[in-house]
Amino acid sequence: MQSPHVWFGMRILAFLLLAAPAVAAQSVALDSTTRVTWGAYVDAYYAYDLGRPASFDRAFTTQAARSNEFNVNLAHVEAVIAGARVRGRLAVQAGTAVHANYASEPTIGAVSGSTLARHLQEAYVGYRVSERLWIDAGIFFSTAGAEGWISSENLTYSRSLVADYSPYYASGVRAVFQASPQLTARLDLINGWQNISETNSGKALASRLDYSPREGVILSHYAYVGPEQAGHVRVFTGLSATAAISPALRVQAEADVGRQERDGGGHDPWSGGALTAHWTFRPHTALVLRGEWYRDPRQVLIATGQPFGLRATGASIGIDVAPVAGLRWRSELRTLEAVNAVFPTRENTSGMSRANVVFMTGISLTVREAPRVE
């Protein structure tokens, strides 16, 4: 005789088999507006670090991460789903920036870690709960900062220190609320500070507000709180502003601060900021300038082994050429100077230098297929 549990399970299975055609037909009707856009992106580069690091790996950066080497900074292919009630994006990626950025992705257990995580740029699905509210789940770009992960979408080719040492990605659930045409609010429940694989039993909260008082101006506030190393709570917040001063001139400013609990009480702070200007001085050609600073004296995010951690300032100048839609050729000269000798070099016997100078040039192509209209 079959047990009641088996009989109950068979009845549920039979119900699902009978209901599936009706549900599928209803789903097709509801999702008839859904479209898929396919895309691809390739960013190839060459960089020359005057320190000539012996390993060819450049320190304190994810972009143009190799010296004296032709390579691919970032390449990805994507499928973007957009519908009246559903949305999503799947993008798989590779490149030296990927390996540099995911180098600290934890591996606890046998079925999660950087081997898989580094290749999933984004992989999320979303449902429109109401006219103004979306709920997404999966892996997605983080709430932090003014500079994003994809080079061609930023004012500069390289990333500032404050961008490279705040999260680019997160894994969890997010709510995105369009409060008004000018204000967007986002709240994330995530595993932690730029990690897909979990490192502790706690979860973190991240938020972002984007306010556009007029066309061409975006003011943003972002924040993070959650348990990190040894369960110590990390708190982070920042402000950024992007403004089109004129059709030819765009400026961007960012300032971030953070702190983390330490053993025995108290907190360890860090801070950073950047100011960037992008001036299109002739058709398809722009001049880019950036100044930046960063302070992590207690080495919360950046381990240098030096008494004062990383305390650095920097500047860069670049030329952007965009001859056709989707194609960008970007060249940049960047210099950083630190209080301590933290940059690898072969120019002196100690093997380390207080200054770092690098020239980089990269060409990128973005291609997206138009949605099919049936």
Image: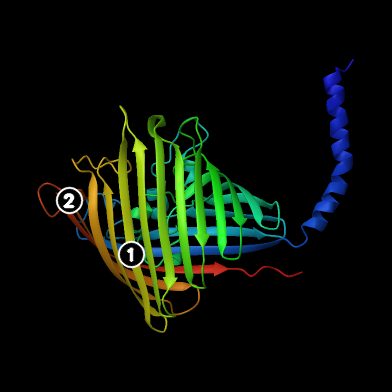
- Residue ID for mark 1: 275
Image quadrant for the C terminus? bottom right
- How many dots with numbers? 2
Amino acid under label 1? Leu
Q: Taking 52 as reference, is 14 above or below it?
A: above
Q: Position of residue 169 (x, y in %)?
A: 48, 49
Rendered view: 345 above or below 319: above
Specify the quadrant that holds the N terminus. top right
Would residue 22 appear left or right of 360 to someone viewing this image?
A: right
Counting from the top left corner in percent of width and height, residue 232 is at: 39, 32
Label 1 residue SS: strand
In the image shown, does 169 or 293 lie closer to the viewer?
293
Q: Secondary structure at mark 2?
A: loop
Residue at image coords 61%, 68%:
369
Give coordinates of residue 78: x percent, y percent. Answer: 57, 58
Packing grade of label 2 (10 A; few <14, some 14-19, many >=20) is some
Tell me the mark number nearer the camera, choosing from 1 and 2. 1
Residue that carries the numbered disc 2 in the rendered image: 339
Q: Amino acid at mark 2?
A: Val
| Residue 153 versus residue 58 in the image, above or below | below
- Taking the view exactly as shown, the residue that stands out farthest to the bottom is 282
Residue that appears at 19% across and 41% down: 306
Q: Is residue 279 left or right of residue 118?
A: left
Distance (Cα) linking label 1 and label 2: 21 Å
Q: Earlier in the sequence, mark 1 or mark 2?
A: 1
Residue 334 visible in image = no
- Farthest residue in the top direction? 1
